[in-house]
Image: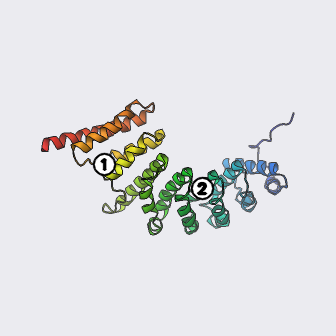
Amino acid sequence: MATKPRLFTASKKGENYELRAGLNSQYADQRKDSIKRVIANMTVGKDVSGLFPDVLKNMQSDDLEQKKLVYLYLMNYAKSHPDLVILAVNTFVKDTEDPNPLIRALSIRTMGCLRAEKILDYVCDPLRKCLQDDNPYVRKTAAIGVAKLYDLKPSLALENGFVGQLKEMVADSNPMVVANAVTALTEIHESAIANDPAEGVFILDSAVIQKLLVALGECTEWGRIALLGAIAKYRATDAKDAEQICERVVPQFQHANASVVLAAIKVILRSFLFCFLFLVNE
């Protein structure tokens, strides 16, 4: 019976030569196996950056698992070998236009995780397209990419209008896109006010809150936590406003996830406080 190749084996002389040969094999299964061995060596701390061109050749594949492995390799060496990552830019851009939405999303997510300043200018056009993608999975992934870009170079995210696009995505028809847009905007807002309290970018008003409340019931548990966290920061305009928020949030007490329940409790307590203050001041 055939046995699976061992990935985590002791390093030996000429191993990189064998890996290089495998990465350039005419057989797809051998190339994929060699990529797995490269990742295994990388995981245990061995420097396999010398195989970069050979690994990069295998990036152009319809095999999603193989593409993920290559992307993992690129993310590992992006910061220490930025000059090498430049070689992958064209393939990344091509992948953001792939017919498969999973590949488009994976590509834009990986570009955001590379954290190499030399490729930032190449990220903008693909990111803009992915923010407007027809597929909600791609859009929600791109939303987080804006936060990552802002973290690296705020001016680039602002100049390209990405923060403005995120604000528009709060009204997206897909609740998970809304949740990720709110997550990204919250992160950007906190970063902005940390540098300058007057530079907040995510201003919560009644119209925005209504959009978040609409999306709340249809999100995943982590999406609900993000939305409830944003709603908790909103200051109700009057007692009726606070009461309406309570009515929409109370059903979250029945959620199986304790974090969702705690986030909902925080919203309710703040809303009760505002109700009390409004009544006292009447």
Q: Give the x, y percent position of residue 37.
A: 75, 48
Asked if 86 appears above or below 104 in the picture, the reply is below
Callout 1 crowding tier (Cα within 10 Å): few <14, some 14–19, many ≥20: some
Secondary structure of the residue carrying numbered label 2? helix
Circle 2 Cα neighbour tier, 10 Å, few/some/many (<14 / 14–19 / ≥20): some
Q: Which mark is residue 110?
A: 2
Q: Residue at x 64, y 65 (%)?
A: 89
2 or 1: mark nearer the eye: 1
Image location (x, y in percent) of residue 91: 67, 63
What residue did someone put label 1 on? Answer: 234
Q: Please state which of residues 168 and 195 is positioned toward the viewer in this rendering.
A: 168
Could you say where residue 123 lies in the image, as x and y percent from the top left?
56, 64
**Measuring 71% from the left and 57% from the top, which residue is drawn there?**
59
> Where is the C terminus found, in terms of image quarters?
top left
Q: Is residue 99 left or right of residue 167?
A: right
Measure how far apart labels 2 and 1 are at the Cα level: 33 Å
Going by the numbered disc 2, the residue's amino acid type is: Thr
Vertical position of residue 262 compared to residue 66: above or below: above
Of the 4 image quadrants, the one containing the N terminus is top right
Q: Position of residue 216 (x, y in %)?
A: 41, 42
What's under tag 1, amino acid-wise? Tyr
Q: Name the one closer to the observer, 243 or 4.
A: 243
The label number, if any, that marks residue 196 in the structure image = none
Label 1, secondary structure: give it.
loop
